[in-house]
Image: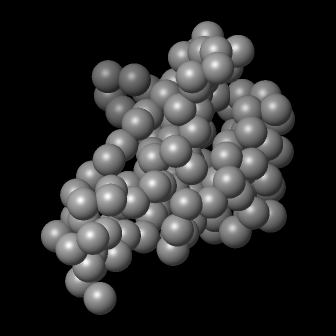
Amino acid sequence: MFRRLALAFSAALLAAVAGAANTTLPSNLMLPEPDRAARGYVESWVFNIELTGDELKGMEPCRKILAERGFAPTLSKTATSASPALHFKIAGHKNYAQASTEADDALTAIQQAKCAGALSWTVTNKMARP
């Protein structure tokens, strides 16, 4: 059974808090809970990054960054009767066995690329008994 720890930030929210010293980073969420670790639980982590927008060309640099960093990005296209304009989503995930600043570096690279669209990310833990 998975217990989900998730934080999702839009690109606007990230920009608003980027200068703050207390910005939550993915690696901060990947730290094991001491009580669970003492009882023998082992946690691993899945870091998901999504970029959604109306213009695929402006999102391409971020797709390349995700691919280079091992996130295996996928592209999906959507349109609905309520919103007939075409929307694109690039999503990728990567598994981590323990807390890693590599996840922070990937998020920073995506933010610095300033790709078109809204950025969101989540960290989810997976628990297992050893």
Note whether residue 58 is visible.
Answer: no
Residue 107 position in % (x across, y down): 68, 43
Q: Nearer the viewer, residue 34 or 65?
A: 34
Q: Nearer the viewer, residue 65 or 39?
A: 39
In the rendered image, residue 91, in percent from the top left (x then y), is placed at 55, 52
Q: Residue furthest left?
A: 1
Q: Quadrant of the N terminus?
A: bottom left
Q: Is residue 24 left or right of residue 70?
A: left
Query: Could one spot residue 31 in this view of the protein?
Result: yes
| Residue 7 at x, y percent in the picture | 41, 36
Task: Work out whether residue 111 or residue 79 is closer to the camera in this orientation and state it.
Answer: 111
Quarter location, residue 73: bottom right
Which quarter of the rendered picture does the C terminus lie within?
bottom left
Q: Is residue 72 left or right of residue 115?
A: left
State whether residue 71 is above or below residue 109: below
The correct choice, above or below, for 88 with respect to 117 in the image is below
Q: On the rendered structure, is 99 left or right of 82?
A: right
Residue under the image location 64 percent in, 20 percent down:
21
Residue sticking out furthest to the top: 16
Residue lying at 24% horizontally and 83% vertically, measured from the top left: 129
Question: Residue at the location (47% across, 55% down)?
Answer: 30
